[in-house]
């Protein structure tokens, strides 16, 4: 990290969090395997292996702005992915155009987006 | 063509057959709706259950209603009753106040004190401009003159501020001094910030006042061609003792006020002593003017009182101990407790309907999504008709009313263990502040929401709604699964609400042999706690169908059931944290937060209460040794040893889960309590309630911690009374599976059958028979 690279606010907490998360991402990238992805696809809500649990905890802790979510198109029939604005009054924006038949599959779609973002970070 | 949207609310939540109900409706994109009274029987559309079930009911009000767009005044403020227009001062003037701005740079001008017309620029006002600086301005319609401070106000620091205007010389002066002590503000003495500003300008003219402009604190008069007069430029933060003079006070006089001195009498027009009016039981919305004109002010959208003032020293942590240090009144620019819409329709409920959960179903356009609205209310019989009562947890519904967990709470995904599943109503609530917030939300200025009311559309107290954070029915729609079960089993039941229990006490439950509480009876006033305890101790038989039971203390005013106060206090497990010294409710003077903080453990009533929560998959129960006690065999009749109970359900696939309650002798579980069944194997997304342990540590989660379980318990009481608790929110949502033919249904059915029957319980009957032999 370059000195004060992220110093856009008075809050040094933000600077530290960025550094903490960059170290964390370096490690988490090593946990991404086909087995972990398959495990999530099979059971997005259950008790997970430690690598998957660590990845999920990181994804869930991300700030609200641009955080992924599932949007109901038709209950129990059609779901899409969105990203939240993090700003009151501003609706979530659509992400991709895939329609998922179940909330569980859409949840896995969110997971794959997080994995992609992690690997590209 | 505009999207059709229909929203509404009723004047009352709890009614009796034949009583009059008023429905308030606002609509976009349509001027008519089709109205139909319905009885609600099952609320969740999940394909594993019976689906949504309603029953249309004949009613004089069914038919086409004319509707219109209605507006809600958002934000809290005080309006001074000034019929003689004493405050329409057009000469020299002084305005002064102690203030604690929460967010000086919130993005719009904030009016603190004044008689100001925003649209036409008439009057005078002391406020905070868009750059977060104190400003005083006067207007005469065509022009405005103003003076602003040199330094911005700091967030959450107490100041004494004033503006003086001498119309003889035209000199307008701002007086700004910080008054932080070691406790009252966010910052202490060490920081080298200069809080002070003393600036003068010579104004070109004096203010002109319009007759109709009100004197407001924390806002100013505005107007819109569709909605007419309203209040804008709302202030976020606290105001303590404040006043108005009809002369320009000198520096020494202002210094005296800053130091807490009595206001000089000369030229005093009004002095609102915000510490006047406290009693041992709280304080209301009237702010008393102790000056010569008695121009009292009244709160709109319930400004928050019982808040620490500029002179708070932290030795006393409640207004009851030192009211003179509790002059703070906090305002929020997005507070809503009452939409105050015009009545769209009023009618008498039919005489021949049965007790239950009802709604006026309103449809327009294609009648789907936001073009369909259910205005829910609850109907009791004129006189009790059954042996059984089901209690809807309306206090808990209010606590969660219009919550925005999913879109606004960064902690929600770690808790929920899943991304949110957002619906159209969630987005509508997020876009439009007029729906107001719930006790799980923060105001936009960062403060927790402590008032929540039902005179506004409650978009999550609707059938079909699934909570977006966790993707499941929650509270009211979940409770309908128990109602559908009672219907399916053909029980003779009436309904009650928390409101009835709060205002009528144990008498509301007394006619019934058996009372079933809801899936989530979390929020309880002291009246409700007392009533429940007295009902059971008096021989009543009580089934706590859900979990997270009897946890949080809340308060209602004696004359207003529509608004509930809730302050969040304690360690973890809360959506927000009240500021130090502000833990006691203005409504009653009681400490808010968890009942177990004051030794009123839920276990004393139900035998179990909160063990922890999680939102990954739910689990089944297994029978525990007490189930095999011959005296208690009636509870598990029809269930085989080793059988898993409830490895299914609409609440995450199991009967034990979501939130779990457990047996705990140290926290008041009655010693005679028997544990009939317990759940286990909860995943690590379940985390134990940390109230019981001194230190948080890694072993708090499901697979490491035996405390993470739901206990199904039985506890005898006096006079044949008894309590059964299921220990799980998911329990009720397992009942509808397989067309209600399952072992969760069997278990609950055994208990209801026995509890509803007069005379001794089955085990006791056998004991008597054996003794007789």
Image (cartoon, coloured by chain):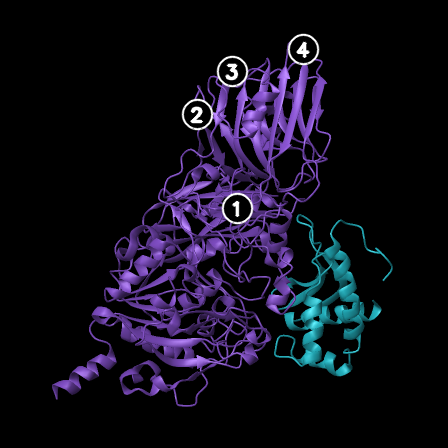
Chain colours: A cyan, B purple
Residue hosting label 2: B290
- Is residue B722 rendered to the left or right of residue B666? left
- Is residue B618 rendered to the left or right of residue A94? left
* Residue farthest along the top direction in this orientation: B168
- Pointer 1 and pointer 2 on the same chain: yes
Q: Label 3: chain?
A: B
Judge the density around disc 1: few (<14), some (14-19), many (≥20) Cα neighbours within 10 Å: many
Marks 1 and 4, how far apart at CA: 62 Å
Residue B555, image x and y in percent? 41, 50
Marks 4 and 3, how far apart at CA: 18 Å
Marks 2 and 4, how far apart at CA: 30 Å
Q: Label 2: chain?
A: B
* Dot 3 and dot 1 residues touching (CB under 8 Å): no
Residue B697, image x and y in percent? 58, 73
Residue hosting label 1: B33
Residue hosting label 3: B267
- Is residue B536 rendered to the left or right of residue B213? left
Q: Quadrant of residue B514?
A: bottom left
Judge the density around disc 3: few (<14), some (14-19), many (≥20) Cα neighbours within 10 Å: some
Q: Label 4: chain?
A: B
Q: Give the mark, 4 or 3, whose residue is nearer the N terminus.
A: 4
Residue hosting label 4: B169
Closest to the observer: B73 or B585?
B585
Marks 2 and 3, how far apart at CA: 14 Å
Marks 1 and 2, how far apart at CA: 50 Å
């Amino acid at each position: 990290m370059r000195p004060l690279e992220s110093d856009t606010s008075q809050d040094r907490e933000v600077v530290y969090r960025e550094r903490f998360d960059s170290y964390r991402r370096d490690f988490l990238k090593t946990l991404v395997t086909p087995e972990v992805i398959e495990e999530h696809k099979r059971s997005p809500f259950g008790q997970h292996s430690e690598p998957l649990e660590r990845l999920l905890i990181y994804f869930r802790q991300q700030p609200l702005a641009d955080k992924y979510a599932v949007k109901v198109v038709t209950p129990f029939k059609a779901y899409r992915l969105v990203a939240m604005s993090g700003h009151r009054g501003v609706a979530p924006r659509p992400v991709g155009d895939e329609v998922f038949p179940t909330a569980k599959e859409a949840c896995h779609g969110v997971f794959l987006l997080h994995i992609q973002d992690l690997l590209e970070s | 063509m505009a999207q059709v949207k229909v929203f509404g609310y009723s004047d009352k939540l709890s009614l009796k057959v034949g009583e009059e109900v008023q429905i308030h409706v606002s609509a976009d994109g349509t001027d008519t709706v089709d109205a139909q009274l319905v009885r609600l029987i099952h609320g969740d559309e999940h394909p594993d259950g019976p689906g949504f079930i309603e029953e249309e009911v004949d009613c004089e009000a069914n038919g086409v209603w004319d509707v219109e767009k209605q507006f809600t005044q958002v934000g809290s403020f005080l309006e001074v009753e000034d019929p003689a227009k004493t405050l329409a001062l057009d000469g020299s003037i002084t305005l002064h106040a102690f203030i604690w701005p929460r967010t000086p740079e919130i993005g719009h001008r904030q009016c603190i004190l004044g008689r100001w017309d925003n649209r036409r620029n008439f009057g005078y006002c002391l406020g905070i401009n868009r750059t977060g600086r104190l400003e005083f301005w006067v207007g005469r319609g065509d022009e405005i003159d103003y003076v602003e401070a040199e330094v911005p106000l700091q967030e959450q620091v107490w100041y004494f501020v004033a503006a003086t205007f001498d119309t003889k010389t035209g000199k307008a002066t701002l007086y700004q001094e910080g008054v932080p002590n070691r406790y009252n503000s966010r910052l202490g003495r060490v920081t080298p910030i200069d809080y002070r500003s003393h600036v003068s300008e010579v104004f070109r003219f004096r203010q002109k006042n319009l007759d109709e402009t009100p004197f407001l604190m924390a806002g100013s008069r505005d107007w819109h061609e569709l909605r007419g007069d309203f209040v804008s430029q709302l202030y976020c933060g606290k105001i303590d003792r404040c006043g108005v003079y009809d002369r320009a006070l000198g520096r020494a006089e202002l210094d005296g006020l800053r130091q807490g001195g009595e206001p000089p009498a000369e030229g005093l027009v009004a002095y609102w002593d915000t510490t006047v009016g406290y009693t041992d039981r709280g304080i209301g919305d009237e702010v008393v003017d102790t000056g010569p004109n008695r121009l009292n002010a009244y709160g709109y959208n319930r400004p928050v009182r019982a808040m620490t003032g500029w002179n708070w020293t932290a030795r006393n942590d409640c207004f009851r101990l030192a009211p003179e240090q509790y002059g703070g009144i906090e305002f929020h620019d997005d507070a809503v407790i009452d939409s105050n819409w015009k009545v769209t329709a009023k009618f008498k409920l039919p005489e021949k309907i049965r007790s239950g959960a009802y709604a006026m179903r309103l449809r327009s356009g294609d009648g789907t999504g936001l073009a369909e609205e259910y205005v829910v209310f609850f109907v009791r019989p004129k006189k009790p008709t059954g042996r059984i009562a089901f209690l809807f947890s309306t206090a808990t519904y209010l606590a969660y009313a219009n919550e925005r967990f999913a879109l606004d709470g960064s902690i929600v995904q770690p808790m929920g263990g899943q991304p949110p599943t957002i619906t159209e109503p969630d987005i509508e609530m997020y876009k439009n502040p007029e729906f107001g917030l719930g006790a799980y939300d923060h105001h936009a200025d960062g403060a927790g929401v402590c008032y929540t009311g039902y005179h506004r559309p409650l978009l999550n107290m609707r059938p079909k709604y699934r909570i977006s954070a966790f993707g499941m029915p929650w509270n009211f729609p979940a409770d309908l699964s128990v109602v559908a079960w009672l219907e399916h089993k053909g029980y003779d039941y009436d309904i009650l609400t928390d409101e009835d229990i709060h205002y009528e006490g144990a008498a509301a439950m007394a006619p019934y042999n058996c009372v079933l509480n809801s899936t989530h009876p979390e929020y309880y006033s002291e009246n409700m706690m007392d009533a429940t305890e007295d009902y059971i101790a008096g021989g009543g038989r009580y089934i706590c169908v859900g979990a997270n039971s009897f946890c949080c203390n809340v308060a209602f005013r004696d004359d207003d059931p529509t608004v509930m106060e809730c302050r969040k206090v304690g360690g973890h497990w809360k959506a927000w944290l009240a500021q130090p010294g502000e833990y006691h409710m203005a409504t009653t003077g009681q400490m808010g937060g968890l009942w177990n903080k004051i030794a009123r453990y839920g276990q004393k009533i139900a035998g179990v209460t909160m063990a922890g929560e999680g939102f990954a998959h739910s689990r089944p129960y297994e029978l525990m040794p007490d189930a095999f006690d011959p005296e208690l065999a009636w509870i598990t009749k029809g269930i085989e040893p080793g059988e898993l109970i409830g490895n299914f359900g609409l609440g995450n696939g199991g009967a034990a889960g979501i939130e779990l309650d457990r047996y705990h002798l140290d926290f008041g579980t009655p010693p005679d309590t028997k544990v009939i069944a317990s759940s286990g194997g909860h995943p690590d997304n379940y985390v134990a309630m940390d109230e019981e342990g001194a230190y948080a540590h890694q072993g708090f989660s499901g697979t490491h911690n035996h405390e993470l379980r739901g206990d199904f318990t039985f506890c005898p009481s006096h006079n044949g009374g008894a309590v059964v608790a299921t220990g799980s929110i998911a329990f009720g949502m397992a009942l509808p599976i397989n067309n209600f033919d399952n072992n969760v249904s069997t278990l609950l059915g055994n208990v209801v059958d026995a509890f509803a029957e007069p005379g001794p319980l089955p085990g006791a009957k056998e004991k008597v028979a054996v003794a007789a032999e």
